[in-house]
Amino acid sequence: MPVIPTWGDGRRVRIGLLGGSFNPVHRGHLEVAARALRMLALDQVWLMVSPGNPLKPVEGMAPFAERLSGVRAVVDGKRILASDIERRLGTRYTVDTITALRLRFPNASFVWLMGADGLASLPRWRDWRTMVATVPIAVLPRPRYNMAALFGQAARVMARDRCPARAAPLLVRERGHAWAFLPGPQNGISATALRETARTDPGHPSGETIIASKPPSSDATPKRRTAASATGAATPTKPKAPKRVTDPALAEAAKAAPTPRKKAAVAGPRRRVKREPVSADKLELYLGVITESLADDKAEDIVVIDLTGRAAFADRMVIATGLADRQISAMSAHLERKLADAGLKRVSSEGANGSDWVLIDAGDIVIHLFKAEARALYGLEKMWGADLDEPEEGPVTTL
């Protein structure tokens, strides 16, 4: 496997930097690296194994050699590389690592890769403002952290530097003061949960078996059920009184979606088109069509939530924001046409004629198109995540 030289070289390549403890490495890390290669048009992604994370406890941290060996065992060594360069550089904080790499690889173009949890906790990093001025950043969605990231302190400070996802391939050309939130499927695998499983169940598979495993499903062949029961809660005998909305903008958004189906669609569509579940390859194909179409229509904050094993009404939920009724209607029409061209013929939608919320039922994929106020009001990301205020673990990246 090639070794990245400590003292650098004159390579002219586009490199994504994904730092972290990798304690242990899992499928989510590889998915982030592969997606970054594709969406940012990178030549390589370096998985930089950190000797130690200042924001994570030493207890429970596997030896550095073991973590590095685990990463090397699962990367291809060509486009995705495992590296101990941070240990060889002797740097402890991300800002120092990036400065050293820029000096030693002057012709390379770098972009820092992080999960949404990293952006949410970025203000805790050493000299984080200097860091964001030194290297462009690509943020990838992660369940439970997206809203905290997009509305957190760092995102507000860097609001003027945000680039649209459709311009992602140009991001690596920047020298700093630029970042983008990239849409795509989300992986909820937690290194903390994997370590806890290994501790409590020593017989549980580890290494590549864990990386290749999928989140367990409650039923091998789950039955489709209606949106009213998709949340798993008992049907209330008496409807609850709606909460008062004091913000005029939110009140207006609430008036725009009064239909019973829209209320039930917070968890998924109530009336579903009968169709057999699609294969994993087709599911990824349709997701690619959807996210590319939304990006072409200048949708904002595109998020794809993986519902596999968590809901029976769909396998993926896509959420995006439009600025005006006409834009949202156009986004809906383009999606239906492009999905039909891709082979998905029977797609139903509601609210496309002038609404703050359009719901599109594409079988195994449910798409929600919102205006910003309505999206904040209904908070689907929060509903399908958990507590956004107290992360279980630190950022995916090293500090």
Image (tube, rainbow, N blue to C red):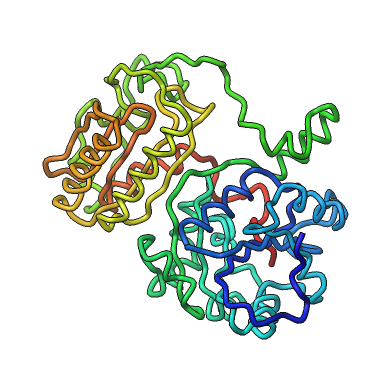
Image-based side of 192 in relation to 269, left or right: right
Image-based side of 284 in relation to 8, left or right: left
Q: Nearer the viewer, residue 131 or 267?
A: 131
| 285 versus 100 height, above or below | above
| 91 versus 290 height, above or below | below
Name the residue rendered at 40%, 69% in the picture. 162
Q: Nearer the viewer, residue 281 or 87?
A: 281
From the image, which quarter does the C terminus lie in?
bottom right
Name the residue rendered at 44%, 25% in the picture. 231
Q: Position of residue 72 (x, y in %)?
A: 76, 53
Q: Nearer the viewer, residue 286 or 216?
A: 286
Name the residue rendered at 83%, 35% in the picture. 199
Residue 363 appears in which quarter of the rendering? top left
Q: Position of residue 335 (x, y in %)?
A: 25, 42
Q: Nearer the viewer, residue 56 or 97?
A: 97
Residue 336 appears in which quarter of the rendering? top left
Q: Position of residue 345 (x, y in %)?
A: 24, 28
State the count of labels: 0
From the image, which quarter does the N terminus lie in?
bottom right
Image-based side of 177 in relation to 134, left or right: left
Image-based side of 80 in relation to 264, left or right: right
Q: Position of residue 61 (x, y in %)?
A: 83, 52
Name the residue rendered at 20%, 29% in the picture. 259
| 375 versus 236 height, above or below | below
